[in-house]
Amino acid sequence: MKQEKRGQEPPSPIYESLPPPWLPKSHKSADVGYPGFHPPRPGQDEDVLSDKHIKDGFLLPLPVPDEHQSAAAIFLQQDATGGRMFDQNVLADLEHLMNDIFTRKADSAVTIQPSTFKIPSRVTMSDTKRQTWFAELANPDVPLSKLGKSVPHGAKGHDLLDLLHTNNVAIPRAVWFLRVFGANETAGLRNKPSSYNPTQYSVDWAMVVTSYIKKQLADIALPRAPRPGMNIKQIFKGVLSDAENRDRWVSRFTYCLKLLRPFYDEGLVDHRTFLTWIVLQMAACNLAQAGFVAHLADEYLDGVLEKRPLAKPLLDACIAKLNEIRTTSAQGHLNKLEEILKSLIQRICVALPDAFVSPGAWLAHSSLLCSALAGPTDSGPSDCRRRDFQQLISDNLIDIQRRNDAMLFRNLPPRKLERLGSLVVDIQILNSICNSTDMSTISFFSSQIPDCTSSSSFVDKLDTLLTWAVTPLQYGSHRPYAAVTLLRAYHERNARRELSSVTLHDHLFDWLDSKPVVREAGNLRAVAGLFGKLIKNGLFDYAAYVQRLVARGEEGLSLSEPDETASFHRNLLRWIPLQNTTSSLLNQRKVIVYGARARQTPEDVCEREMRREIRAILPLVFGGDTLPPSVSMSSLRTSCPTVLSAPCFEQVRTIKQWLLPNLHKFTSGSQSLDEISTLKTYSTAVELLRYTHSYGSLLELSLSVLSQTSHAELLTAVGEVFHRFATIWTAMNATGTIASTLYSTYLLWRTQGGKARSLLTLITEMDHGRQLDATAKTQVENEIAAFTNALAPKTDHPETVPLVMPEILLLAEDSKPDAPSILANSLWYRYRTSGDWAWKVWDNIVASLRQVPVMSEDHERRHTYALRYGQFLLNVDHYLPGGIDNDVLQWFLGTGKSELLGLTPETWNVLRVVLLFLCVHGALSTTTLLQGLVYPAWRLGADAGPLYQTQNMETFIQAASELFDALVLQEECFISSIVPQELLDAQRIHTWRQDAFREPHFTLLASNIPNLVLLEHNNVVSDELRGVARDLRLRTCRSRDIRQSCYRNLDAVRRGFEHPIQSGMVAENALRTAHTDVNSFLSTGISSVLSPCTLAATAGASASLDKMTSLIFHHSMASEEAYFIAEMARGVDGPVAIKFINNGFKSIVDILNRSPTPSTPESLLVRVGRAGEVLRVLSHVSEPLREEGTVLDLDVSTQERLVKIILESFQFANAAFSKTTDQSLRVITEAVIFLARLLQFDLGFFGIRTTPFGETCEKMTPVLFDLVVIHACGPAQDAVAFALILDTLYFLIDDLFLHSKTSSPDLFKYYPTKLQSPHLHSLPSSHRVRLLTLFPHLRPNAVVQDLAHAHRDSTGLLVYGAPVQNRPWEWIENLDKDDGIIRNNASLSLELFGAKATGDHLIGYVHDEERCMPTRLEGVFEDQLTAESVFRRDWRETRLPAHSDVRAGVRGVGEESDELGTLPAFGLQKPGSRRASPASSVRSRGSVSSVRRSPGSLSGNRSAVSTREGTGESGIGPDPAAERKRKASASVDDDDEVEIIKGPVPANPKKLKVKPKPKKK
């Protein structure tokens, strides 16, 4: 080699191939290289080129001879026949060999020495050394093993935490130091095992940490209202207002929260103490602090959700903060806080819905909770998890609402009543029929009744319907028509049934044959008329009726038989009318009733007399030339007594077969007669048909006249008939026919150029938007709009109407017949664009009428002037789109009040003529005069005091009362003595008074009847006027029209009488009168005794109400009777409700406290049943009060007695469960359910709770919990009773907390502390989960969860001991380096785990990321040996990884099970796993493994569903993609345990394809 030249660079070193840094050596001490690594080297055998190497290739020699052979091959060669292959001696020899191997291996293993762990001691250091020590603690480069020999002694509590924050010590190192600090603090207590609690210091430390956080939160204060003259900025300095202070505060608070997380995870702070503090702090903090506290609650909510005692107060606090946010002016800046609070409420609803079961909170905040739990409306298709989460909330919310409403006795389900209650409801439905009712919508025979007329429900309802139609206790001529309409509709629905008609006929016959109401003589006409209509509609077969009577041998059917043996069916055969019948049936009837030889019957004589009377009152119909003199209603009844008293058979036959055809003939030829004659004839016929209740013939006649007449006045009269009997036409279901005919008539008149403006209003009234098609309705609306625009055109510059119109005053002296019409036309033409011209015209009319008595002394002349003014106003009415009615009403309610008081009696006499004239002709409605004139006069007289002006007021009241008498009560009234009395005028008065009996005007009438009573008893008013008031009151109570309206709307009557009574306006003597009036409006008997009106009327008389409620509650009632009473008393309020409920509670106490005390479950059940009747009444009476949230002042002593007797009954039932047999368990359960419902009902009245009441309730909580456990498992298990009693326990506990007076309450005070029962083995898991939420014991720390002490007995069996208790302050981190040597110097001794040395070593975990081994090679080069056997290790190392397709098809549930059974699966949590522990970074503590697993963990409790949603961390359901990813990673991590080379054959080979293994060469 040549020498290198000077300055020449040295040659590069020869490249040397090195193994990867992560590749371990093949042997620890011997230099045998690396597995799988063979770098090239000079002189290696591969470089030698020989013929053999070139021809055959290079082959390495075997390191060990015959390494691929075993003794088995030699053995098989020696034993060619295989005789000893399966010899038991050979297997035994192998077993002894392996046992010897294991024994020698165990003997050679190193023994584990006793624990040498010592807690680092505390030493006193100088300030400099202490500061240096903390600086080194904050320096991550200084190992803790250097600092762990001793720790400084000094600062404690808040100062210690401040010191750690000031030095910015890393959280893991700070936790280590604080753990050592706590271990030294508790060192002295550990020497006293009997009194030492390892977790007590966690409670103390939790108080330190929470007070430290609270101290920081206290720095966040809200500004207060400044003193006058001082700026708010001068007096308020918040810690967050300055940037430097804010950064310092945020840094300290953040550091504290970071420390808190490991404290909480490892149990260094007591969970119960810390969570309780969060809950109480949320309730006590202000809105500024709530933002931080809410984040704390959100982070640690999982712990809160474990226990209802924590979740319920947190829920209440969140609700209170939401309410506070909504009322504060800074709401716009608190959106984030509001979102967090709503999130907390939603998560509580998902995880622990029982926290929402609190009737008090639900009653106060249900709307807020519903809005907080409502999900977003813009959830898209990708938000499936959010939708599932919201659906779960929605389902829980429905259940929560149902349970709270049930305990509040709200929305009580309707009872299926068969007797009294059903009767009340049915009659209420029937009485509600009015002119606006749609008969097709009345579900009297409801869909719940089976589609068969033979059911008992149908028979009961049929009885109710027919009795209602004929009884004199009900009112209205429409009743038989409504009954027929309802039956016909039901019959048409069931027409497909072949036997429907026959069965219905049988039921009708049975009712006719058996009901007492049919046999009453006064009901004969009503029954006959009803069945005549049923026969006409084909619902009742008259021929079958007669045949059935004959077939059963009915005696006394003939009139020839004596009356003593007469059958009541004889009168029915005589009276029931027949229409469209056959002559044979008539002959058969004649033979049965009168005999076969009768030539002339009484019916023939009666019909001849009827015809004679009818010809006399309707001469023009039968060819006469002259009209009779003016006919009145009374004279008409006097002129035809036979017609009115004749049986229905003769009336119908005479009218249908003789009168009606003649009337049709007269109508068709009426064009040749004058309008007045035709109008009088029609009005007389109408009244005659009304007297005989022939409304079907009246309808037929009116429709005929409507389509044929050309007289405008006659057309108006027909319309008035339709309006007067509108309820009857509705009951007939004929409004559609009337509306269609009216519309056709209107089209005809409009084509002929006639004016039929009144028809448009009548069409709208009769149609009710149901009959006419859309085109017709549009046309009617357009016509009305055209009339309105023509009469009152719209303009931007309306004409101004003067206040005084002299031409109106001059009209009185103008005797020309057309003067009124000329003046009305001129005024309209001049002022039609003005909106108030009609009001000013009326004002001038009243002013002119005041001058009439001055203008003339003659009475008749005054009335002539009044009628002239009336005619003028009638013409004005025709020029107004809506008539003059509303303008007059506004005048009455406005300036007219004072003017009416100044009118003299002479002026009132003139004004009365004008008002009656306008009312008769339809220009003024009866309701306008009542509302604007009569009711104010009564109210004025009722309120009259000492300053009462006698003359003017009494004149006004007297005139108003006379007007009310004429418009509402009198059968006929006279407009004036100079006007002839006409039947048509009386009919019109009856027509327009119907509006006062219909809604909405009847409510006003009912509310003013008490004013009439007060007027009667006002001593300030003159005796004459009080007598007038009394006469009006009595006649009003006797009016059938008013009684019918009262039955239709009982609520209006009740409200009308309640208001003056409750307001204290009624004197004691007037009280009895009001009571009598209510009873007269209703019927006598229990319905009036128990009506709300009666209860309201007796509200002031305490003794009377006590007597009434005593009568109600102190006699036995069936469920239907109790419901009936409750319905009648429903709706009372104020003092009546308080008295009613107090007396009800007293009655329940007396029933349950009756001596002797119950000795058997059956005796208790009897008392419970009787008390249940009273509770049923009280629940329905109080339901409206709960809806309104009314607070009732209940009797305190009664409440205390009630809870005491409930407690004693609960205790008796609790003791009886352990002594009774299976037959009596159900009896006790029924009694307990009622007592729980009674307690719920009582607690539902939120009022003042006395101390004895609270003490009794506190004693009741453990008894209630015992009953909950009894019904949760064992022989008395009952799911319904369990849920109901548990909800009652919630209600009771929440009520106790609500009225607790302690400033710092114990959230677990009233909750149970232990679960005891001999039947806990049968407790369902769902019940167990709900019960465990009540106890104060939180879930143990994850470190010791499912970990227990165990030892082996003398036989080698494993015996389990007590569970391992967490010792967070004693289990200190191990600071020694893990070099593979077993030292047993950690805080947890290896003796606790029964550890033994195996001789194997753990490969240290490489922390450098660059040296991390790839996952695919981890299972090849690392052993991961802890406790695995040689066979398990050999199994693991000889397996091949599964194909990727197989891993992709891993199933989620039951993935280890196939058709061949369940494969053995090793623990999922491998001992010795080097994955990081979530609890601690210390390997000695993280390696703790449970000796046994609890049943809870095996059932999946440890994989509980988190309530957080929407963040991707967790959710209601696992994400499929994430689940597959998790399983795939798990399969890689578990390579060293079990891998299936070839799994089970899938059910569908097409779904799972596995790449076949390559063939070996």
Image (spheres, rainbow, N blue to C red):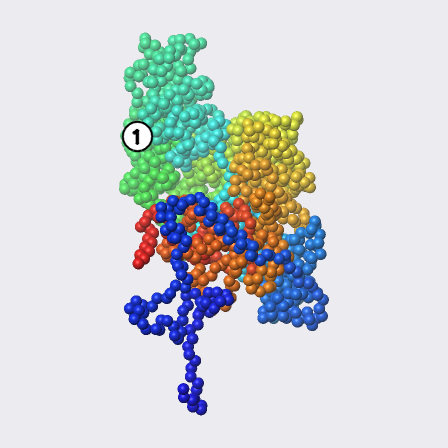
In the image shown, does 844 or 273 lie closer to the viewer? 273
- Point 40% across, 71% down: residue: 39
- Point 66% across, 35% down: residue: 1204
Residue projecting furthest to the bottom:
6
Q: Does 611 sit above or below residue 1073? A: above
Amino acid type at image mark 1: Thr
Residue 527 seen in the figure: yes
Q: Position of residue 1157 (x, y in %)?
A: 65, 27
- Point 55% across, 48% down: residue: 1492
The quarter of the displayed image where residue 132 is located = bottom right
Query: In what quadrant of the picture does the N terminus appear?
Result: bottom left
Q: Position of residue 182 (x, y in %)?
A: 66, 59
The quarter of the displayed image where residue 1210 is located = top right
Q: Does 1044 sit above or below residue 516? A: below
Query: In what quadrant of the picture does the C terminus appear?
Result: bottom left
In the image shown, does 757 or 1297 lie closer to the viewer? 1297
- Point 43% across, 33% down: residue: 433
Q: Does 1388 sit above or below residue 1123? A: below
Q: Position of residue 78 (x, y in %)?
A: 38, 50
Q: Does 1083 sit above or below residue 1392? A: above
In the image shown, does 1499 or 1309 lie closer to the viewer? 1499
Q: Which residue is mark 1?
A: 667
